[in-house]
Image (cartoon, rainbow, N blue to C red):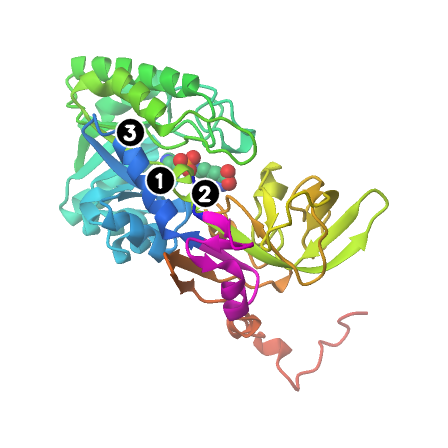
């Protein structure tokens, strides 16, 4: 459930008409609902309430400070994958004691920042990384609490670009090597073996792969304990899918029950890293129609948002529902149109043609379920600056990231000395 609904003929975010925000900040912009974020966090927390669980929101899904702070106020921790995300989580008010530092390639300076901040746990993904962490921790005189991310070789049955739990993927330690890596870790200075971590992918729509991975991990915990390791934490990652179109993902309750039944008896503290499930339906991308062009097969609705603002449709062929901000009259005629951006690539489309009521230049459209992996994946391709992010709470809204201007972008560039004004081209150059 989300809080973007039609009221009195127009789409609102909670009690704020989207049109008002568009008049105020211009388009395109991302708009997030506090009530939806809070609701999703609470539903998830309740679903895993029977476990000794820490929820570490996966900041990569939406790392706006206001989003992280909204969740931190409800008690959420954070899963971070870079020095930048670590800083965001701390600035947004997440206590370091609830931050997990994950990621397949951490630099020594990122590790040092995490250890100095006092993060709860570092999830290590390779032997060289373990050795670097040992060096960094010893130099700082700190013992790093470490979980080894294992690769359970399980097919998450999701888009190939976001499946991470198969042996051919770059993630985690391959299954056969796991016991040896734990033995190595236990002997390294500055390393305190604390747990096991696993994450098999994202937008997972079936409980079976989760169950299979968690059962493998549960068995592994027994083996590791028998080898003398104190396994206190189990980080089960994120990945629970959400409906974009007509998918029927498992409910958080079903997921929570399955997790409880598989690992509840192991006596470990459980860490969960939901991202999409919390933020996905809490955001929309609002765009204005530049014009409508007749194509050979169907009309193209050309809007002022593009693949640089929301790359999911072009990168993963992802479906995002598109709705007019002005509520169409009941029984309005629908026409198949393709909503596309202005970027010079055929891939700059928001998806296959779909039925929309009569659309005209100047109309506002909302691209739904854009709260996760939307703004965070944006680029400035075609010199299209990053768009603003707006947060709504009941009848209030606030700009939580300003629109970046082209001048801001140009101010960061400069000409090298040899291109400075007044200098001639090298003799012969361009011949
Ligand atoms: N934990 C780890 C270690 C992860 O790598 C991820 C996501 C999560 C948690 C959160 O997963 P979630 O609950 O959000 O599924 N850009 C892609 C998704 C990439 C997911 C990367 N890792 C997309 O737009 O679909």
Q: Which residue is tagged 3?
A: 47
* Residue nearest the observer in this picture, 270 or 145: 270
Say above or below: 126 vs 34.
above
Q: Which residue is mark 1?
A: 40
Q: Earlier in the sequence, mark 1 or mark 2?
A: 1
Left or right: residue 416 versus residue 15 is right
- Please tell me whether residue 5 belongs to the stretch shown in magenta: yes
| Pointer 2 residue | 281
Residue at the image point whose x is 72% and y is 45% from the top:
338
Left or right placement of residue 389 versus residue 52 in this view: right
C-alpha gap between disc 1 and disc 2: 9 Å
The span shown in magenta is 4-31
Q: Cα distance, mark 2 to mark 3?
A: 18 Å
Quarter of the rendered structure image containing ligand 1: top left
Q: Earlier in the sequence, mark 3 or mark 1?
A: 1
Q: Tell me which residue sits at (57%, 63%) in the image.
A: 27
Asked whether the beta carbons under mark 3 and mark 1 sit within 8 Å of each other, the answer is no
- x and y percentages locating residue 215 in the rendered image: 32, 15
Report the number of discs.
3
Q: Secondary structure at mark 1?
A: helix
Do labels 2 and 3 touch, CB within 8 Å?
no
Q: Earlier in the sequence, mark 2 or mark 3?
A: 3
Q: Residue at x 31, y 28 (%)?
A: 236
């Amino acid at each position: 459930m989300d809080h973007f609904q039609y009221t009195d003929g127009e789409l609102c975010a909670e009690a704020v008409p989207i049109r008002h925000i568009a008049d105020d900040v211009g388009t395109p912009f991302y708009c997030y609902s506090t009530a939806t974020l809070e609701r999703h966090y609470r539903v998830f927390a309740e679903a895993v309430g029977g476990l000794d669980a820490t929820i570490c929101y996966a900041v990569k899904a939406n790392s706006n400070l206001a989003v992280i702070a909204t969740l931190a106020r409800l008690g959420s921790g954070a899963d971070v994958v870079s020095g930048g995300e670590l800083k965001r989580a701390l600035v947004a008010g997440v206590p370091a004691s609830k931050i997990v530092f994950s990621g397949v390639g951490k630099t020594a300076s990122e590790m040092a920042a995490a250890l100095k901040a006092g993060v709860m746990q570092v999830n290590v993904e390779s032997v060289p990384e373990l050795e670097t962490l040992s060096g960094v921790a010893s130099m700082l005189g700190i013992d790093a609490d470490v979980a080894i991310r294992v690769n359970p070789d399980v097919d998450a049955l999701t888009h190939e670009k976001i499946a991470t739990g198969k042996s051919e993927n770059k993630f985690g330690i391959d299954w056969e090597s796991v016991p040896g890596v734990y033995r190595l870790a236990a002997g390294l200075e500055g390393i305190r073996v604390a747990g096991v971590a696993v994450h098999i992918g994202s937008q997972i729509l079936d409980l079976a792969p989760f169950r299979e991975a968690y059962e493998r991990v549960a068995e592994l915990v027994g083996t590791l304990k028998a080898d003398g390791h104190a396994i206190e934490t189990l980080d089960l990652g994120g990945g629970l899918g959400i409906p974009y179109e007509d998918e029927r993902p498992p409910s958080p309750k079903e997921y929570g029950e399955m997790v409880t039944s598989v690992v509840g008896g192991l006596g470990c503290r459980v860490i969960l890293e939901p991202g999409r499930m919390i933020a996905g339906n809490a955001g929309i991308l609002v765009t204005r129609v530049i014009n409508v062009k007749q194509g050979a097969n169907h009309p193209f609705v050309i809007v002022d948002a593009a693949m640089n603002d929301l790359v999911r449709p072009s990168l993963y062929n992802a479906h995002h529902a598109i709705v007019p901000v002005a509520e169409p009259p009941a029984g309005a005629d629908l026409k198949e149109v393709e909503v596309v951006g202005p970027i010079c690539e055929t891939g700059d489309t928001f998806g296959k043609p779909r039925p929309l009521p009569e659309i005209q230049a100047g109309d506002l459209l909302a691209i739904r379920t854009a709260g996760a992996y939307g703004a965070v994946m944006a680029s400035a391709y075609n010199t299209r600056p990053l768009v603003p992010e707006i947060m709504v709470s009941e009848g209030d809204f606030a700009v939580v990231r300003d629109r970046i201007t082209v001048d801001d972008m140009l101010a960061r560039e400069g000409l090298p000395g040899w291109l400075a004004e007044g200098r001639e081209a090298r003799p012969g150059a361009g011949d």
